[in-house]
Amino acid sequence: MVNGITSNNFNQTGDWVEYTINAPVRDEYYVTYFIATPVNNTAIELVIDGTTVVTTSVPNNGSWNQFAELKVSQKINISAGQHKVRLIGAGTNSGKWEWNLDRFELTNTSNGSKSLIVADESELSISVIPNPVQDSFTVSGLVSGVKYNYAIIDFSGKILISNAIDTESNFVEGVNNLSTGIYFMQISDTENGFKKIVKICKK
């Protein structure tokens, strides 16, 4: 925890963190990191499914814990579906220190430029029960007493349903009007900045 934010920190050159993402569509994506470093000559290498895609220099912003937005100028191609994304400390700092990372975002360049926000898998193990869903479902793995909101999003990035999750039962209802298919549910805790994407199947 850094300033109340769960982050990947104490990174040195060669250290890495790995995420699983689900890209809703095949497209070109912009990459944005929320990152901090008080040292020079640091960099972050983005690897998708074992292939290096882009390496970006991380500017010194004078802090380990004041996360700054870093937009990568190069767009990257990602096919639809699940991928492994690895972020590696790849700078040339003489002390081998790199950066602290809050999170990163992938934003597709079409379909209204909707963002798919990827949370660290180590934060919470969240699932939907049952899945496939019919009229309602329960969200498992949320922290008791925390207020969460949810949004159900289709493959084009359009928000179809959004509301608060019941804090006592973690129960979500009112999805009976959704057509049969696959959707993404973004769960967010607005007080702490937590966001998580869960894939749901409507039958």
Image: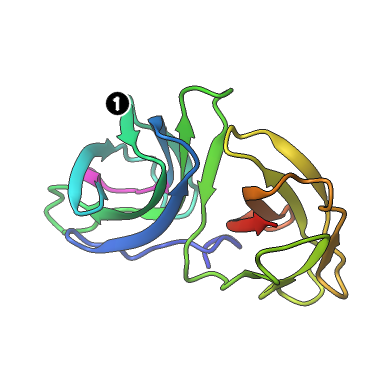
Towards the viewer: 147 or 35: 147
Q: Position of residue 38 (x, y in %)?
A: 34, 48
- Residue 90 appears in the picture as rendered: no
* Amino acid type indicated by mark 1: Gln
Q: Quadrant of the C terminus?
A: bottom right
Please provide the residue range marked out in magenta: 35-46
Instruction: Give the residue drawn at x 15%, y 50%.
Output: 93
Q: Position of residue 30 (x, y in %)?
A: 40, 30
Answer with left or right where residue 72 lies relative to residue 148: left
Instruction: Give the residue drawn at x 58%, y 32%.
Output: 156
- SS of the residue at dot 1? loop
Up the image or down, 130 lies above or below 179; here it is: below
Answer with left or right where residue 143 lies relative to residue 168: left
Residue located beneath label 1 in the image: 74
Instruction: Give the residue drawn at x 18%, y 48%.
Output: 51
Q: Does the magenta run of residues contain 36?
A: yes
Q: Quadrant of residue 196 in the image?
A: bottom right
Instruction: Give the residue drawn at x 23%, y 44%.
Output: 43
Q: Quadrant of residue 89 in the image?
A: bottom left
Up the image or down, 151 lies above or below 7; here it is: above
Towards the viewer: 29 or 191: 29
